[in-house]
Each structure stands twice: as structure tokens, then as C-alpha cells.
Image (tube, grey):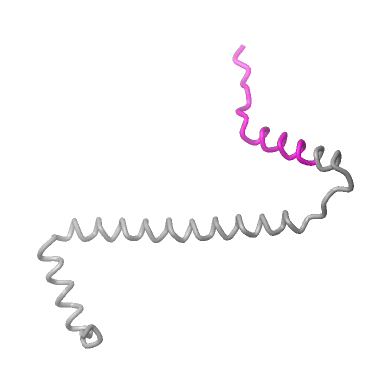
Amino acid sequence: MLNNIGLPGLLLIAVVVLVLFGRGKVSSLMGEVGKGITAFKKGVKDGSDEYDRAAEDAAKPIGQSPAEDAARAQAQTNEALRDVTPQSTDRS
């Protein structure tokens, strides 16, 4: 049944929607749909990047001793804290 709509049917549906809801409502709705699609694409890309980073971390060689692993983990923690810790400003 839906295979037989065609271009004239789609245009008729679009005109009916415009008449019922008005141009402002339809344009704001389409804007929200666009934002949703953009957010979805960004989420998929972020998930893919996170997966790639996890795969790279898994491929890294493990240290020779637990002390080396602990030192590497401490260095990564310090680097992460340095990235998120606000820098103090001198207000003298």
C-alpha cells in the first residue's frame, strides 16, 4: 500500500501538514529532527573513537614488573589530573 504513494501523494501530505500545523511549527520540528540526527552521529563517532582507543590500549605491551605498571598508571593519573585541575591565577 505504501509503495503506491509516489510524488503527488507526498506533496499532498506535505501541504496538509503545513495547513494543519503552520510553517513555524513544521520548521521548528525539522530543526529539532536535524539536531537529533547530529547528536546521534556525534554519539556514534565518539563511541567508535572510544572503542579504537581501548583497542590500542589493549595492544600496548604490559610492563615487565608490577612496579613498572604502577609507575605508568601513576603517570597517567597525574597527567589526567593536570588536564582537569584548574590553573590558579595570581591576583596580587
Q: How many marks?
A: 0
For the N terminus, the image quarter is bottom left
Tell me if 51 is positioned left or right of 65 in this view.
Answer: left
Q: Residue at x 61, y 34 (%)?
A: 84
Residue 12 lies in what quarter of the image?
bottom left
The percent position of residue 68, horizontal first and vertical second, equals 85, 41
The percent position of residue 88, horizontal first and vertical second, equals 62, 22
Tell me if 62 is positioned left or right of 13 in this view.
Answer: right
Tell me if 37 is positioned left or right of 74 in this view.
Answer: left
Q: Residue at x 49, y 56 (%)?
A: 43
Relative to 5, residue 61 above or below: above
Tell me if 69 is positioned left or right of 50 in this view.
Answer: right
Q: Which one is in front, 88 or 41?
A: 41
Q: Which one is in front, 70 or 14?
A: 70
Q: Main secondary structure of the magenta part?
A: helix
The residue sitting at the right extreme is 64
Which stretch did the figure color magenta? Answer: 72-92
The percent position of residue 31, horizontal first and vertical second, equals 30, 57
Relative to 17, residue 87 above or below: above
Q: Residue at x 18, y 56 (%)?
A: 24
